[in-house]
Image (cartoon, coloured by chain):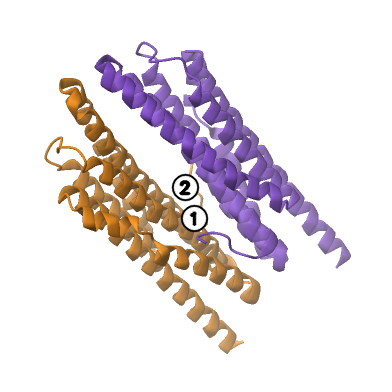
Chain colours: A orange, B purple
């Protein structure tokens, strides 16, 4: 029994490491996509567009690990909730990987046009979204409720920035219709970044559910 | 043991009914939001904006059911995979509920402006997305692989329509900059509908994983 428990905890730790790894990859790709837009670097954009097969492989592998852990160890209480949380976090991270591709697609179109304006708020949004994602995953690994709650607060700031970017770019479009296409793609980029924040928020809520067995969602 | 098994199958059937119920609610709200845009009906839009507390309650309840089923019955094989799939499907449906709200938000702004054009492709996108969602859930309940695969095919059509809507509205914005704000909101609506299709696709992929224990994702 002792060995069995030890083995289970090792497997659970390995599962957490894989999720952190996947989060790191997703974060890296987000950063690369936004940096490519700011630097007007089409080659870097192509790297993001060429696919996220590492993330996708991890996605399949992590789901598989979760099902095996449930089947072989029949965990209870917080361990069971951790694995259910891991299944959900895995889906969220995979979609963050997809969003990095979406950002690069909009970015690629954006670079076909003259710059609309100096990009300040979009890189700021990217930094907030990445930090939220990292904090949410750290909160998962360390079962840290305070850190999870801080992610929910950061999401409000991200939403404000998104609205500001929208108003700002709309003003550009109205003042100078030649900026319409480029501004439109930047608006889409900001929406994708907002959605990264939503996924980080989901992860944080799963952590709160896992740790406290209290469902803070929809209150 | 016989009673135990029977009880588990009853619980699993009830779980499926709850997911169908949630899917029905999400579909209804989507339909209401898009119809409100087409009919320029602000009162109907308000109904969608006033919240999706029924969906949110089901979201929490279904997660809870899944955890209890795993803890109390320690299911194996396809039953275990069904419950893991249910956890994921539950998240996808909840986000479809959120997307109905997002559509209503963009719709509310849209109705402050003169109509850009007769809306044909957007209701068509909504119909496809709703059908995909319903088919994906039916495929889950009936473990129907063919139906699940048909959802993946429908998603390609939805993506094409989304690109067509984008090109069409961009042309309107470029020809007549007074349509910029309204067209922008319609573009956002079409993106939200595309995302409903993505969630339906996720559900279909989970069904394929559940039935065949073969992971078709990322191939």
Image coords of residue B186 (percent x, y): 40, 25
The answer to whether any part of residue B19 appears in the image is no
Same-chain status of marks 2 and 1: yes
- What number is the disc on residue A209? 1
- In the image, what residue occupies the spot 72% across and 62% down? B79
Q: From this view, report whether residue B189 is shown above or below residue A61.
A: above
Q: Position of residue B28 (x, y in %)?
A: 60, 28
Q: Secondary structure at mark 1?
A: helix
Which one is in front, A198 or A97? A97
Give the percent coordinates (x, y) of residue B23: 62, 38
Q: How far is disc 2 from disc 1 in space, using C-alphas?
A: 7 Å
Farthest residue in the left direction? A118
Residue at which label 2 appears: A216
Q: Nearer the viewer, residue B79 or A154?
A: B79
Q: Is residue B196 left or right of residue B76?
A: left
Say the numbered circle drawn on residue A96.
none
For mark 1, name the chain.
Answer: A
In the rendered structure, are the residues bearing label 2 and label 1 in contact, judged by CB atoms less than 8 Å apart? yes
**Left or right relative to A53: residue A42:** left
On screen, A57 above or below B141?
below
Residue at the far right in the pictured view: B2
Residue A61 visible at all: yes
Classify the position of the N terminus of chain B by image quarter. bottom right
| Image coordinates for residue B76, horizontal then vertical, percent | 71, 68
Q: Residue at x 37, y 69 (%)?
A: A21
**Label 1: few (<14), some or many (≥20) within 10 Å?**
some
């Amino acid at each position: 029994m002792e060995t069995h428990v030890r083995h289970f905890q090792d497997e659970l730790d390995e599962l957490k490491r894989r999720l952190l790894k996947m989060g790191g990859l997703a974060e890296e790709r987000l950063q690369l996509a936004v940096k490519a837009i700011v630097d007007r670097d089409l080659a870097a954009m192509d790297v993001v567009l060429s696919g996220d097969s590492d993330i996708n492989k991890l996605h399949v592998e992590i789901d598989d690990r979760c099902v095996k852990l449930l089947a072989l160890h029949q965990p209870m209480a917080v361990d069971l909730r951790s694995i259910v949380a891991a299944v959900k976090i895995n889906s969220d991270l995979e979609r963050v990987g997809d969003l990095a591709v979406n950002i690069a697609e909009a970015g690629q179109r954006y670079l076909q046009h003259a710059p609309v304006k100096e990009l300040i708020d979009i890189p700021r949004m990217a930094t907030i979204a990445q930090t939220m994602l990292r904090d949410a995953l750290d909160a998962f690994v360390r079962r840290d409720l305070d850190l999870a709650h801080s992610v929910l607060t950061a999401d409000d700031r991200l939403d404000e920035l998104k609205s500001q970017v929208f108003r700002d770019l709309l003003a550009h479009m109205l003042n100078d219709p030649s900026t319409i296409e480029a501004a439109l793609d930047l608006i889409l980029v900001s929406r994708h970044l907002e959605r990264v924040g939503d996924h980080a928020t989901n992860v944080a809520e799963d952590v709160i559910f896992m740790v406290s067995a209290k469902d803070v969602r929809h209150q």
